[in-house]
Amino acid sequence: MVNTFDLTSLLRENIRELTPYSSARDEFSGVASVLLDANENAYGSPLERHYNRYPDPLQQQLKEKLSTVKGVPPRNIFLGNGSDEAIDILFRAFCRPGIDNVILVPPTYGMYEVSANINDVAIKRVNLTTDFQLDLDAIAETVDANTKLIFLCSPNNPTGNSLHREDVETVLANFNGLVVIDEAYINYSRQKTFIQELTEYANLVVLQTLSKAWGLAGLRLGMAFASEEIIEVLNRIKPPYNINQATQELVLEALDRVEEVNAWIRETVAEREQLSEKMRELPFVQHVYPSDANFILVKTEEPRHIYEYLVKQSIIVRDRSKVALCAGCLRITVGTPRENSILLEALVNYRTVN
Ligand SMILES: *Cc1c(COP(=O)(O)O)cnc(C)c1O
């Protein structure tokens, strides 16, 4: 792997030549008093708040504000209807169906695989090592001329750990395609974000989301941070109005309240450590993996039994025991202190019930 990264040659030809849809809001985005260009209902909406106008296709106000929160210029930010939309658009921009391939490093987030399958893009799997880190030699051997994307998730879902920074940098420095680092859980991590490395690596895409620490999963706002050239490509492919007006307005409001979010993050991290410790004391728990996220991966003797027992108590966790390297494992989200003690109490009683 020698890095001779060239964005233009990486792009699919049809995307390189694409004339994007030009919306009414693209052609006129200034201030005017009579807007008769978009076939909207000029009278209003049957709601308190009016949503009769199409939203800003490029979400400029929102990006300005995110820019100050994240320390990245707006031109390096793409907004998607969840990170899942950014993932799908990356496939559509760079991967020729039936020809190109991507590298995934299981166990990891399931959407990369689903998106690859939807787009008819082959998957090359290079399992993480037993301590859930990158197998750099195997990745280097697996890359071929048609490998366009490598997805790395750090902190990783479902294992919870962060990838070693030097390993991620090795991949970035040696791969000619795009390295997508999914930082959905970065707010809970001891590691720092890769956003600041955008000036260093032309082939870097960092994904973040407001669905986890920011508590806005229902609004659907995912972010991709990358070079201006990559962002421009994503913007040309995306549906014109992919971020709805309500989301744009509500997120602008939410971004003013970062202190509340930071307090939750501190509490979640403290709860995570406490929950991990208490789980380690349970007789049927074999291992609680260290976590940099808002969930823990717990290895047990009988994951399915425990899962079903908890369902009967109206407590739902995620059974990950069928996933590569995760035999016996349940993934448990850190809840409120009350939820965590309900879970622990149920688990303490597990043996006696069965
Ligand atoms: C939850 C999660 C996301 C979030 O996806 P959204 O579409 O933004 O809600 C992205 N990546 C990973 C690894 C996740 O666990």
Image: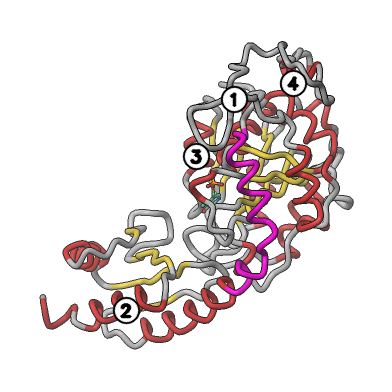
Picture coordinates of residue 235, whole percent (x, y): 73, 29
- Vertical side of 198 occupied by 22: above or below: above
Residue at the extreme bottom: 281
Q: Amino acid at mark 2?
A: Val
Q: CA distance from mark 3 to mark 1?
A: 37 Å
- Vertical side of 206 occupied by 55: above or below: above
**Of the pair 107 and 211, the residue shown nearer to us:** 211
Q: What residue is shown with label 2?
A: 285
Q: What residue is shown with label 1?
A: 52
Mark toward the viewer: 3 or 1: 1
Q: CA distance from mark 2 to mark 3?
A: 30 Å
Of labels 3 and 1, earlier in sequence is 1
Residue occupying image coordinates x 43% and y 68%: 297
Contact, mark 2 vs mark 4 (Cβ under 8 Å): no
Of labels 3 and 4, earlier in sequence is 4
State yes or no: residue 259 in magenta. Answer: yes
Main SS type for the magenta part?
Answer: helix
Q: CA distance from mark 1 to mark 2?
A: 54 Å
Q: What residue is shown with label 3?
A: 113
Q: What residue is shown with label 4?
A: 25
Of labels 2 and 4, earlier in sequence is 4
Dot 2: few (<14), some (14–19), or many (≥20) neighbours within 10 Å?
some
Q: Which mark is residue 178?
A: none
Q: CA distance from mark 2 to mark 4?
A: 56 Å
Picture coordinates of residue 335, whole percent (x, y): 41, 70
Mark toward the viewer: 1 or 2: 1
Of labels 4 and 1, earlier in sequence is 4
